Amino acid sequence: MAIPNHPRDVHEFRRWHQYELPPCEEGRWQVQIPWSKNDTDDVSDFFVKGLEIANNGGTLWLQEGKTYIIGKPLDLTFLNDVHVRLEGTVKFTNDTAFWQKNAYAHPYQNSLMFWKWGGNDIRIYGSGTLDGNGQRWWNEFAGLEVLTSSAYLRPILFYAENATNLAIEGINYRNSPIWHNFIVTSKNVYLHDLTIVAVSTNSSAPSKNTDFIDSLNVRNLTVERVWVNIGDDCFSPKSNTTLIHVNTMYCNGSHGESIGSLGQYPGEQSIVEDALIENVWLLNGDNGARIKVWAGANVGYGRVNNVTFRNFHVGHVDTSALIDSCYFNVNASTCAKYPSKMNLTNIRFENFVGTTSGKNGRVVATISCSTSPDAVCKNITFSNFQVTSPCGGPALIACNGVQGDLGVKCYNTTSSEYKAALNQTCKSPLKPVEKHPW
């Protein structure tokens, strides 16, 4: 299968996938609010008041060329039939101590939020920007890890809970301190024609954990035509997300299209089911398609079922397809003693092309299933899988514990073939985003 070109930068993405700002809708009243005079002019109260006036049939219009500074947490969970026409910039202050003390919190992975949205029939659209002002957060977080450093928490740029019919379209996300979107206990969520960029200007403080979107207890999630240049998962549906469709994503520097992580919390059931993720370009990252489930003494259970990764184009990724049943940083002996309790069934990797980075030698994909007798791992299949290694020699797919035929030849990680392929490492240059890498 020939690899098509991809947009070389955000501007070319916008030319290829043009988002036309719709005209102001008849029958909806428009509300405008004062904009900020400078970076310390907090207009939070005006923002809330504007949404209260626009609620139940109106549009809050944030004007082009204007910046709206938000300096305190906002509860926007009262919304019904409201539009936000974002043509300017909404920017959060970077008073890290204030936000850590006052931001809203969610127990999942100790999440913080600048604000929380919720309600029915919410549409946020336009050509403007949500700016998380993340550089100071990344600087102060440097050297820490999100799942082990609970003393330093960072707020999510956009958070919604109990939302039905939520649409976000056209806008630009910039520099979230951590995840750019976290959608919880919601249904019918549609994100399209977006750009998401979080690139640090400090080489010793990367933009870690800046996922594009994470979801929890969400039904019917659709993502289309998105450009992502961040420091973590390009897409990451978490526990109890079902009916997922992703179509046309460009990801640079990410950890891949990741299902999970799942099974983190003891006794909790986690489900991701009925997902199609297709037409994805991934450059200079850790993974292409990934499923990550927890192992250990105190973990949850559940299933990943009926997931298709289709039409993936990879360049300089360490592993093009990965099922990791020993997440998070669980060593081999602990994983063997306390294997994952997650069932993995009907997982398909279809039409993959491109090259890996060479970090794992000639190993281009790894499927590692749980060793638990109570965990099912079957109907995992590869078709038209044409990923190669820059290290020379035949590409190798590793597999442990899969029940049934993968559709391709694979080797156990204890085999001499696997060890030889893994040790044949090489270095290859990054794929430049500003040039066609294919």
Image: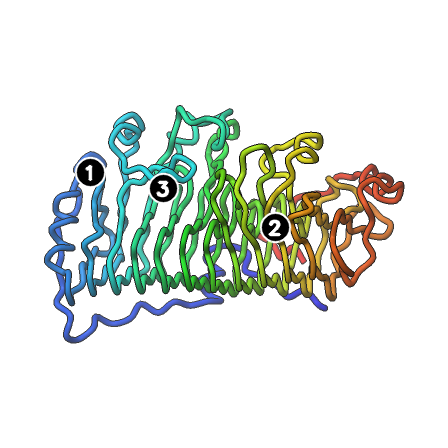
- Residue 380, horizontal then vertical, whole percent: 69, 59
Q: Identify the mark nearer the N-term, 3 or 1.
A: 1
Residue ID at (52%, 27%): 204
Question: What percent of the width, then of the height, locates residue 325?
Answer: 64, 43
Front label number (2 vs 1)? 2
Q: Which amino acid, mark 1?
A: Asn
Please indicate, yes or no, whether residue 261 appears anywhere in the rendered image: no
The kind of secondary structure element at disc 2 is strand
Select label 3 or label 2 by which is in front. 2
Amino acid type for the residue under numbered disc 2: Arg
Residue 104 picture quarter? top left
Q: Which mark is residue 290?
A: 2
Q: Label 3, label 1: how many angstroms apart (C-alpha)?
A: 23 Å
- Residue 82: image quadrant is bottom left
Q: Is residue 76 left or right of residue 218?
A: left
Mark 3 vs mark 1, foreground winner is 3
- Which sits in the foreground, 7 or 360? 360
Q: Residue at x 39, y 41 (%)?
A: 176
Residue 68 on image: x %, y %? 21, 46
Rendered image: mark on residue 156: 3
Question: Which numbered tag is attached to residue 38?
Answer: 1
- 189 to 97, vertically: above or below: below
